[in-house]
Image: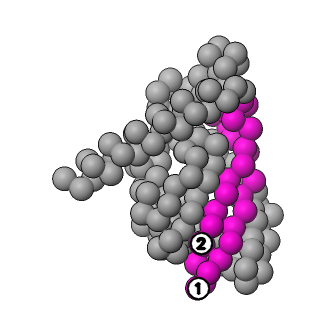
Amino acid sequence: MNDLIEKFYTSFKNLDAKSMGECYHQNVVFKDPAFGVLRGERAKAMWEMLCESQHGKGFKVIYSNIKANENYGSAYWEAYYTFSKTNRKVFNEIEASFEFRDGLIIKRTDEFCLHKWAKQALGIKGIFFGGMQFFKKKLQRQTNRALDDFIKKRAV
């Protein structure tokens, strides 16, 4: 399964959402602090939206410490990008855990410090509010609304 995780992150480095999606089981469950829980095609669409938004903007992914057996895996990765809403630079450190079924990723959880992310992405608002639960819920509503809009636009 190390190869599967390697394929996922190599595809991400290349902003190749199609290849990233090929690593996911059709019933995948993705979870992170920014989006909450996404299932199936919504999880794949999230990566497509993120990849599309970063083309030509100096996006960079570095990954390491990939560990996996036939059922579970983990990796550490770093993302360097410009947050589109504020045009602020972000460096995010993420611990990822994976579960596998039928040779694909069935469950993926990304963990990172949302407060640290918010300080970078949002500046003063992030400093004051980024560690609060209401902020996390509001962010998840906004990111999921953006994902809904992306999916609708893509379907047209």
Position of 69 compared to 86: left or right?
A: right
Q: Does 95 appear in magenta?
A: yes
Which color scheme did the rendering employ for the protein?
Answer: one colour
> Is residue 51 among the parts visible in the rendering?
no
Point out the stretch of residues depicted in magenta: 89-117
Q: Which residue is mark 1?
A: 102
13 vs 142: above or below: below
Q: Is residue 52 magenta?
A: no
Determine whether the residue tagged by mark 1 lies in a helix, strand or loop. loop
Residue 23: x %, y % from top left? 54, 73
Figure quadrant of the N terminus: bottom right
Residue 129 position in % (x across, y down): 67, 20
Is residue 55 placed above or below 132 in the rendered structure? Answer: below
Q: Residue shown at 48%/36% (left/top)?
A: 141
Q: Can the viewer see residue 143 in this picture? A: yes
Do the residues under discs 1 and 2 have CB atoms within 8 angstroms?
yes
Name the residue type under label 1. Answer: Asp
Per the image, the residue denoted by label 2 is 106
Under mark 2, the amino acid is: Ile
Instruction: Report x, y in % for residue 112.
Output: 72, 44
Instruction: Identify the element where label 2 is drawn.
Output: strand
Q: CA distance from mark 1 to mark 2?
A: 9 Å
Q: Dot 2: within a 10 Å radius of its alpha carbon, few (fewer than 14), some, or many (20 or more) residues?
A: many
Vertical position of residue 122 compared to residue 72: above or below: above
- Residue at the (58%, 58%) spot, across then down: 30
State the predominant SS element of the stretch in magenta: strand
Q: For this rendering, which residue is in front, 104 or 84?
A: 104
